[in-house]
């Protein structure tokens, strides 16, 4: 399931042809794969900044294919193809260019992602002369480099300002997400939680699939949701998540978020694997710190003792203070370190808020248009123009504009005001004549 922290795979398997073509599969190190594609796609005589930009695009696109299990979730025994109609050029057994090889040695464990998203960017590209596309133009990148643009400016020119580079990403051997054994009633653990979270997101597009509490326990409700998914997608409706159902869920989950597209809805930190990491403390950085901060930032809106904090991936004094405050509130030893007990208690508090408040249709109903509306408050405030700072600061600005008490807390009155403002915005957005209303109009239909 693609709700995992991205890793650089040790190996990648390439199909030497179009996906459905009868062709050989070749397995090689991911490092060598990037060298091969870089030497097959771009010219070694290009400016170094153009080479760097292209190598990062090549790496990111390949990682997106691996991360989303794009082909494996469709039943193929490979990760990517050598067909440029579908993926990127790979010439088995070719020679490498020394300068390109040196740059790949430096960059192969770096990749592009959009700010706030988890998955590697599906960094599509084309040569920009005989073929054009929405992504990076290879010859255009060379032109920009010759004009004095750096590699990051080149990438932002094609992929937008809201990208960032992940450096020194962790490495990992096997990338298969399926846990190896079927999940059924009585199963527990991270894999069950991943399925529950994925089904909840899919249900926003397929309402016949019941929503679930994400608790990692495969009970009757989870079985019913799995059966509903299986019925919706013409699978054997046994309520068991075997390999076929697991990858069907993954495939649909990636599709509803467009994870394999250049412009996707994206996975965010609330969609990650919530297993407790090693103890986190001052000085730590990375996605696990971001996950902790994200959970604490939600808890802070409902627990007065916990101060609000920025989600920046840096375990600094503000994060330590929030951990200390939460530990005091939860009756845990006040160490300021997020050990397993602290992480699990934070998660329990966060999950309770998510399932009882953020998913409450009375507070956060679906948009009247029938379109999917994000269930967290931050997304709605962002849509209304309240961006930047912490959630508490955005709430205060919203409350000030609405003439409400500026507590920075998500009170029932504030939640209702956010809902009303968002639905008013949604109504305005859906009155355009080109927008299908979501349901057929017939005799007796009325405007809202």
Image: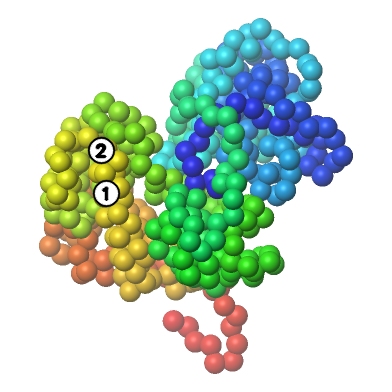
Residue appearing at x 39%, y 46% in the figure: 274
| Disc 1 packing (10 Å; few <14; some 14–19; many ≥20) | many
Residue appearing at x 45%, y 55% in the figure: 188
Measured as percent of width and height from the top left, residue 289 is found at: 32, 36
Q: Secondary structure at mark 2?
A: loop
Residue appearing at x 85%, y 35% in the figure: 23
Q: Which residue is mark 2?
A: 338
Q: Which residue is mark 1?
A: 346
| Disc 2 packing (10 Å; few <14; some 14–19; many ≥20) | many
Q: Nearer the viewer, residue 391 or 337?
A: 337
Q: Is residue 407 above or below residue 52?
A: below
Measured as percent of width and height from the top left, residue 48 is found at: 57, 13
Measured as percent of width and height from the top left, residue 225 is found at: 53, 68
Q: Are marks 1 and 2 in contact (CB under 8 Å)?
A: yes
Q: Is residue 425 above or below residue 66?
A: below
Measured as percent of width and height from the top left, residue 177 is found at: 57, 44
Q: CA distance from mark 1 to mark 2?
A: 9 Å
Q: Secondary structure at mark 1?
A: helix
Q: Is residue 303 above or below residue 169?
A: below
Asked if residue 4 shows in the view, the reply is yes
Lower sequence index among marks 1 and 2: 2
Residue appearing at x 25%, y 44% in the figure: 342
Image quarter of the C terminus: bottom left
* Extreme residue in the right direction: 22
Q: Nearer the viewer, residue 387 or 229?
A: 229
* Extreme residue in the front direction: 186
């Amino acid at each position: 399931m693609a709700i995992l922290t991205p890793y650089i795979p040790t190996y990648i398997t390439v199909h030497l042809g179009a996906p459905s073509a009868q062709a050989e599969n070749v397995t090689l190190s991911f490092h060598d794969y990037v060298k091969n594609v870089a030497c097959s796609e771009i010219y070694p005589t290009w400016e170094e900044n153009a080479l760097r930009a292209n190598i990062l695009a090549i790496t990111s696109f390949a990682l997106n294919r691996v991360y989303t299990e794009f082909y494996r979730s469709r039943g193929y025994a490979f990760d990517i193809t050598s067909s440029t109609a579908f993926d990127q050029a790979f010439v088995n057994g070719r020679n490498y260019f020394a300068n390109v090889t040196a740059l790949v040695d430096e960059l192969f464990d770096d990749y592009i992602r959009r700010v706030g998203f988890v998955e590697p960017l599906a960094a599509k590209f084309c040569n920009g002369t005989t073929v054009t596309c929405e992504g990076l133009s290879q010859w255009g990148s060379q032109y920009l480099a010759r004009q004095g643009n750096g590699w990051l400016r080149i990438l932002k020119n094609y992929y937008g300002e809201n990208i960032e580079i992940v450096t020194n990403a962790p490495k990992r051997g096997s990338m298969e997400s399926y846990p190896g054994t079927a999940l059924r009633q009585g199963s527990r653990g991270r894999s069950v939680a991943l399925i529950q979270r994925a089904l909840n997101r899919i249900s926003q597009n397929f309402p016949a699939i019941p929503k679930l509490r994400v608790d990692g326990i495969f009970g009757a409700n989870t079985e019913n949701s799995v059966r509903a998914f299986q019925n919706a997608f013409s699978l054997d409706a046994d309520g068991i998540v075997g390999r076929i159902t697991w990858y069907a869920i993954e495939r649909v989950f990636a599709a509803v978020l467009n994870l394999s597209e250049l412009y996707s809805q994206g996975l965010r930190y609330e969609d990650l694997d919530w297993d407790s990491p090693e103890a986190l403390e001052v000085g730590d950085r990375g996605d696990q710190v971001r996950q902790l901060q994200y959970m604490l930032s939600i808890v802070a809106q409902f627990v007065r003792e916990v101060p609000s904090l920025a989600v920046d991936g840096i375990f600094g004094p503000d994060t330590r203070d929030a951990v200390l405050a939460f530990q005091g509130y939860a009756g845990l030893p006040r160490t300021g370190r997020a050990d397993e007990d602290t992480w699990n208690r934070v998660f329990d508090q966060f999950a309770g808020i998510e399932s009882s408040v953020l998913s409450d249709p009375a507070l956060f109903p679906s948009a009247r248009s029938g379109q999917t509306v994000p269930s967290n408050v931050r997304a709605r405030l962002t849509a209304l123009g309240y961006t930047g700072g912490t959630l508490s600061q955005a709430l205060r600005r919203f409350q000030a504009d609405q003439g409400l008490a500026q507590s920075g807390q998500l009170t029932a009155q504030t939640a209702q005001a956010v809902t009303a403002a968002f639905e008013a915005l949604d109504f305005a957005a859906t009155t355009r004549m080109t927008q299908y209303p979501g349901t057929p109009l017939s005799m007796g239909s009325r405007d809202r």
